[in-house]
Amino acid sequence: MHKPDHSSRRQFLSLAGGAAVLGAVPVVTLRPAEATPVMLAAAIRNVVGAAVVHTGKVKLDVPPLVENGNTVPMTISVVSPMTADDYVKSIHVFNEKNPQPNIVNFCLGPRAGRAQVATRIRLADSQKIVAIARLSDDTFWSASVDVVVTLAACTEEVI
Amino acid sequence: MPSALINVPAKATRGETIEIKTLMSHPMETGYRRTATGELIPRNIITSFACRYNGVEIFRADLYPAIAANPFITFFTVATESGKFDFEWIGDQGFSETASAAITVA
């Protein structure tokens, strides 16, 4: 009568221990190397400093649904006359969940004629992309887009 | 073998805004991928791209691992005079490539 009691206590303890281990493992593995919204904000602060970032003037063109995150076409255009005293100085693109928050920086000038650039990027997950343009009067304008990615970049193994 | 593809209009009228398309063949290895045996593959990316128009820099880009393999970059410039565009890509592991294209401005 005493013995079954003892074994059930042992079972309970081993079960509880197992559950604790199971609970602990995901805590470790669910912390992948990815930029967080905090890192995104820090990367943006690195570029703009203490300046206020306005919304508008920038158009960020990325497909809203991406099948392959390894190559995602992206076009950024800024509404600007691009004259000698009113032009876009630079365009910076950031992401939320790739391993690094930076994607690309473009330096333009009044000779560009049109403030539009395009490239192809990688996206590791469904996330938000932010483009920030610095104008010649040192104001910052931004646009952001949420993208859904079905096949993520960076995850496949090299054979 | 690295190779560049450049698309610049051969002729333009003075003051016309022209589009320049560039593509450089490069793996853009992020440095975050692993081999099947678990070893980290070292980063190997192009870090900067620049375009000069008759010696004056008109466009520059800083690239990060989030740029897809074989970086494709397009941008615009105003055709001011006949001459040459010089393109330069610089990257990890001593990568350095140049290309050029001529334009006639009437």
Image (spheres, coloured by chain):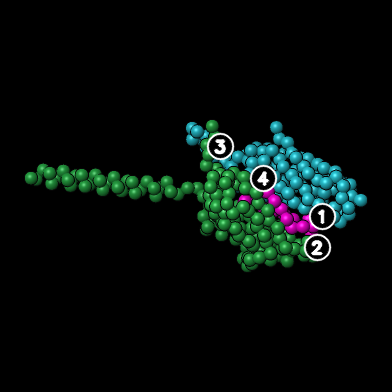
Chain colours: A green, B cyan
Left or right: B36 in relation to B5? left
**Badge 3 is on which residue?**
B41
Left or right: A118 in relation to A15? right
Q: Where, by quadrant of the figure, is residue A147 drawn?
A: bottom right
Comparing marks 2 and 1, which lies closer to the viewer? 1
Left or right: B84 in relation to A106? right
Residue occupying the point 88% across, 53% down: B13
Relative vertical location of residue A17 with respect to residue B16 in this rendering, above or below: above
| Region of the chain picked out in magenta, as a range | A103-119
- Is disc 1 surrounded by few (<14), some (14 to 19) or many (20+) residues within 10 Å? some
Residue occupying the point 82% across, 42% down: B101
- A107 is within the stretch colored magenta: yes
**Badge 4 is on which residue?**
B47
Comparing marks 3 and 2, which lies closer to the viewer? 2
In the rendered image, is residue A92 in sight? no
- B27 is within the stretch colored magenta: no
Alpha carbon separation for disc pair 3 and 1: 42 Å
* Secondary-structure class at tag 2: loop
Kind of residue sitting beneath label 4: Thr
Alpha carbon separation for disc pair 3 and 4: 17 Å
Label 2: chain letter: A
Kind of residue sitting beneath label 3: Ile
Alpha carbon separation for disc pair 3 and 2: 45 Å
Comparing marks 3 and 1, which lies closer to the viewer? 1
In the rendered image, is residue B7 in sight? yes
Comparing marks 4 and 1, which lies closer to the viewer? 1
User: For residue B17, which numbered disc appears in the image?
Assistant: 1
User: For residue A66, which numbered disc appears in the image?
Assistant: none
